[in-house]
Image (cartoon, helix red, strand yellow):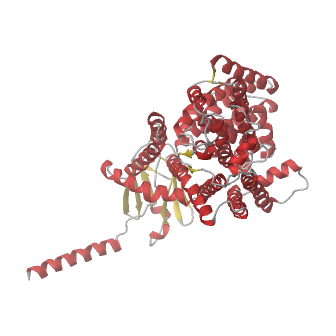
Amino acid sequence: MGKNTILISLLAFCLLFISKSAFANDIVLEKPAVIISNIVSDLFIPIQQFDDFDASELTIRIDGYLIESTSIDKNKIHIRHTFNASCEIEIDHKNVQSKFEVRVIPLWFSILPPLIAILLALVFKEVFSALIIGTLTGTILIAYFNGASWFVSLFTGIFTFVDTTLITTLSSSSHLSVIIFSLLIGAMVTLISKNGGMLGVVNILARYAKSPRSGQLVTWLLGVAIFFDDYANTLVVGNTMRPVTDRLRISREKLSYIVDSTAAPVAAIAFVTTWIGAELGYIQDGVATIGIEQSAYTIFLNSLAYSYYPIFALIFILILVWSRKDFGPMVKAERLARSKEPAKLTTQQDAGYGNLKVAEDTTPHWYNAVLPVVVVVGTTISGLMYTGYAETGWQENLGITKNLSAILGQADSYKSLLWGSMLGVIVALLLTWAQRLLKLQESIEALVDGIKTMMTAVLILVLAWSLASITETLHTADFITQILVNIDASPFILPAITFIMSALIAFSTGSSWGTMAILYPLILPATWLISQEYGLEHDEAMSIFYNVVSTVLSGSVLGDHCSPISDTTILSSLASSCNHIDHVKTQLPYALTVGFVAVLIGTLPAAYGIPGYVLFPTGIVLLILVVKYFGKSTV
């Protein structure tokens, strides 16, 4: 009887619990996964949970204060509220009450994940652990402020990193497109190396690249020539020129710098690029509420007169190349490269890029490499035109340049890159088989080896994107923006402030596009209103407005160049087979130097009306003087 009594008691308890759960009239409150202080949060109360809903008998209090500003959205009561600290929400409907504890993450906490990642990467010269620890810091913070204890949040954060953050990152079609594009490029490069195509290109370029100076110049020219996309630029130029620069004893750090500092700057300011659509979209969002009677494309064209950093960055490379001088950590890297014997390309075992040894009894022909690369470039451009034209068509009232820009603005760059890289691999295979340079099995093994060589790049990219998603969730950019926007400044220094703000956000998040998406809608209306309140004439206000449009873009590129968690910086170092942290450390002094000159000689005086035909030559002269007096010979 004792056992039966216990079983009956347990059954009764379970039935009582189930009945209470089934018939309890507790109110459901839908909260966002993360609530950040000083950031507007949206909370919802589903109406269908009430048997007899009466809005007049619903009261909502936050820390005892009655909330009356609510609305009904899709059969839900919508509450928009800015929380300053953790608090308690009380909801009462017809004497049925529910209380909810809300933990609020202080906004300044949002800077911790990227700051920790950047500091660890620079101090320990190891990017994998830096990115993982930075991301884990974010997931643990989110878990704790969602109600877990510090002990529990430690495990919750680790599990969330694996089952949510990484999965979400890999679920993005744009991220997957970049990964597949990178793998296909890696496969193609390995195949055209083993079939002798790359060595054939080296032999051709050797006619023009006979010295470190001419080798760097050829690299710069290729970087400018592949202007339509920064991803394609870094991977194609880095992989193509690496054997040439090795033979000429140019350091991998210098190659990475040239690749990185031509890719984004030229893609950002050229008329026809994959960037143009994003830029025009962001600008349009920014001017939508202002009432400026100009198209986004016209505003973009006018802003190019103030694009000091991208233009100075491209010219600064030429100054360094021509003077044969460097400064900062690059001096040591270049001198070390000059002191070594020229790399023997046919027997080179390159760490991270597999064995690129040319197959035995293979005569190197340049076209085995050039044709696949041309197919990649040509197919990508054709794909951009095709996908863009399908969206916009051809407008007779627009000129050729505006039509091309409009088409590319609506093009699907990811599809185009995938088509180009896939066809490049196919052409490389067909050329190899047609000439019987490699057997089928050897060709497939070469492709697989190429894919393996890119796994390091893919892993770093995935971790960088994961950290970027955490910074977006925690509103890191809003934290930096609020600090800088609250400065009571005249419109004449707004462009300089915007440049610094943009660079800091891009540096912290590793994303120039994300920075533009955040800042354009915020800073453009603010700039226009401040200019109007200051009493500026229309032309003067428009000059400052164009300057600010440019500085958002320019600052984004600068921050991208300086950030060890930037995807294009990562791709540049990996395509050049350079240690990533060494690339960041050697590029950082150059990027900061150009950025300082761009602000001091370009952005700031331009806001006060000094024309570009005075500022551009002055800035170039100052950069020449910097190299002359601070540079050291690397010959």
Q: For the C terminus, which image quadrant?
A: top right
Closest to the observer, 348 or 221: 348
Q: Is residue 606 above or below residue 135?
A: above
Closest to the observer, 219 or 123: 219
Q: Could you say where residue 352 lies in the image, as x and y percent from the top left? A: 53, 48
Q: Is residue 278 left or right of residue 342?
A: right
Residue 441 position in % (x across, y down): 59, 65
Q: Nearer the viewer, residue 605 or 208?
A: 208
Q: Furthest residue to the left?
A: 1
Q: Nearer the viewer, residue 425 or 135?
A: 425
Residue 134, picture quadrant: top left
On the question of residue 556 being in view, the answer is no
In the rendered view, would you say 442 is above or below 502? below
Q: Quadrant of residue 558?
A: top right
Q: Residue at x 71, y 31 (%)?
A: 211
Q: Position of residue 457 (x, y in %)?
A: 55, 49
Quarter that holds the N terminus: bottom left
What residue is shown at x 74% (from left), y 45% (from top)? 226
